Amino acid sequence: MNKNLAIFPGSFDPITLGHVEVIKQSLNIFEKIIIAIGENYQKNKLFNLNERRNLINTVFKNHQNIIIKSYNELTVEFCQKENCFNIIRGIRNNIDFNYEHSIAISNNCLDNRINTIFIPSTKKTTHISSSIVKEIIANNGDLANFVPNQIITDINKMSN
């Protein structure tokens, strides 16, 4: 088990400034972070897996301590496969906390080595969610305060 490594799972459809903030804060705790792009079949995707991976690669291309992988099994199974039992979750509010806390307990019941670390958002990103970003994209709105600047052009091209 690598204690200097954590997994940040999500659909990242698309990656937002909130995700980036959680990753940067996580790097203050862990040496390396695996960004694990999950194929959640219950969610309607705006971008396919390769598009999401490319957007994340663009954002973190100069970060040696970020690893980008994808998975389609339970997050716990992915953790077991990677021999990494630290899961990072971003929390914007009490609704997020209640939801994520239930998942954390379930994950720990599936494998008691699982440790979930909650990273609270700051006031700069508390309002950001992928759902809101998708709505802005659908209505050709300004993404500047929601996603990293270096991917705005790519998102606009992919979504038109």
Image: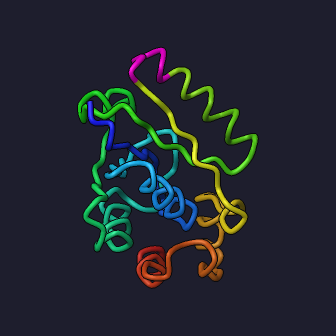
Q: Residue at x 52, y 59 (%)?
A: 19
Q: Which residues are magenta?
A: 107-113
In the rendered view, how is the structure colored?
A: rainbow
Q: Position of residue 63 (x, y in %)?
A: 30, 68
Is residue 39 shown in magenta?
A: no
Position of residue 55 in the picture relative to residue 69 (left or right): right
- On screen, 138 above or below 89? below
- On screen, 115 above or below 33? above
Q: Residue at x 50, y 75 (%)?
A: 148
Q: Position of residue 12 (x, y in %)?
A: 46, 56
Q: Position of residue 101 (x, y in %)?
A: 62, 30
Q: Residue at x 59, y 65 (%)?
A: 134
Count of labels in the image: 0
Position of residue 159 in the picture relative to residue 34 (left or right): right
Q: Residue at x 34, y 74 (%)?
A: 58
Residue 78 picture quarter: top left
Is residue 108 shown in magenta?
A: yes
Nearer-the-camera pick, 55 or 136? 55
Q: Position of residue 49 (x, y in %)?
A: 34, 56
Task: Name the quarter where the N terminus is drawn.
Answer: top left
Position of residue 144 in the picture relative to residue 27 (left or right): right
- On screen, 140 above or below 129? below
Nearer-the-camera pick, 152 or 35? 35
